[in-house]
Image (cartoon, rainbow, N blue to C red):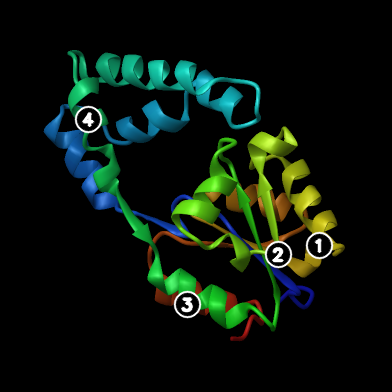
């Protein structure tokens, strides 16, 4: 167990927002995409890398998604998949929302997300959970993205805490590793909430 945790940060997509990975794989099989093909098209292109640090455009990103999907499938699939990609997102993770509610008052609660400039409006106007987070660190606004140590250092500074007093929850192993490299404590969440509970309690987090 490390230093006592004083702040818990959450990723948005894949943690607060529930991602159905089984359905993603089913879509990939249906449309002849390789495993992780959807993810690669959405989040591993240079256009996304630029957009998430505030230097790209949504138009360029969408164009890259479409091109990559068609290239990976070997035939046109972008039109069909673009209508169904939303099926992979299952709203907000109710277990995570209950966790956030239980932590608030005991811990400082924040968000660290690789996102576009629309994140805050989405949290406020669509999901109506903006006020659940004391600090929201959006990569597109600060100019660097996970797993870059600077985004975690920025988040800790925003809370006025040392990195070691902060814990970040993310669904991507390289972001968990990045948080730890920046001095944070960190936990991986892949949809298995009991496993996350055990990991948090092992870190001394109580709610």
Q: Which residue is mark 4?
A: 81
Labels 2, 4: front one: 2
Going from N to C along the chain, the mark reached first, 3 or 2, is 3
User: From the viewer's perspective, is residue 109 above or below residue 207?
Assistant: above
Going from N to C along the chain, the mark reached first, 3 or 4, is 4
Residue at (59%, 48%) from the top-left corner?
Answer: 120
Q: Nearer the viewer, residue 69 or 158?
A: 158
Looking at the rendering, which quadrant does residue 42 occupy? top left
Count residues near mark 1 (Cα–Cα under 10 Å), then give few for <14, some for 14-19, many for 20+.
Answer: some
Please say if the residues under marks 3 and 4 sit with CB atoms less than 8 Å apart.
no
Q: CA distance from mark 2 to mark 4?
A: 36 Å
Q: Which residue is mark 1?
A: 159
168 sits to left or right of 36: right
User: From the viewer's perspective, is residue 56 above or below residue 199?
Assistant: above
Going from N to C along the chain, the mark reached first, 3 or 1, is 3
Instruction: Give the quadrant of the C terminus.
Output: bottom right
Count residues near mark 2 (Cα–Cα under 10 Å), then give few for <14, some for 14-19, many for 20+.
Answer: some
The label on residue 134 is 2
Residue at (74%, 38%) from the top-left corner?
Answer: 142
Please say if the residues under marks 3 and 1 sit with CB atoms less than 8 Å apart.
no
Of helix, strand and loop, which one carries label 2?
loop
Please state the horizontal and vertical placement of residue 175, each as a whole percent of the image: 59, 47
Q: CA distance from mark 4 to mark 1?
A: 40 Å
User: From the viewer's perspective, is residue 176 above or below residue 42?
Assistant: below
199 sits to left or right of 161: left
Q: Which residue is mark 3?
A: 98
């Amino acid at each position: 167990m490390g230093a006592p945790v004083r702040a818990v940060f959450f990723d948005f997509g894949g943690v607060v927002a529930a991602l159905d990975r089984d359905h993603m794989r089913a879509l990939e099989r249906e449309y002849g995409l390789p495993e992780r093909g959807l993810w690669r098209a959405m989040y591993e292109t240079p256009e996304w890398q630029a957009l998430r640090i505030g230097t790209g455009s949504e138009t360029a990103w969408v164009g890259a998604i479409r091109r990559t999907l068609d290239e990976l499938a070997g035939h046109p699939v972008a039109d069909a998949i673009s209508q169904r990609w939303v099926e992979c997102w299952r709203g907000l993770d109710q277990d995570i929302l209950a966790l956030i509610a239980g932590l608030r008052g005991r811990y400082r609660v924040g968000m660290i997300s690789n996102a576009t400039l629309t994140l805050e409006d989405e949290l406020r106007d669509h999901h109506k959970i903006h006020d659940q987070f004391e600090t929201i660190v959006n990569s597109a606004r600060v100019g660097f993205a996970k797993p870059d140590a600077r985004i975690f250092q920025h988040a800790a500074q925003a809370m006025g805490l040392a990195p070691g007093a902060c814990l970040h929850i993310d669904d991507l192993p390289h972001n968990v590793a990045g948080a730890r490299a920046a001095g944070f404590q960190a936990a991986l969440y892949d949809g298995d909430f009991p496993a996350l509970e055990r990991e948090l309690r092992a870190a001394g987090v109580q709610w």
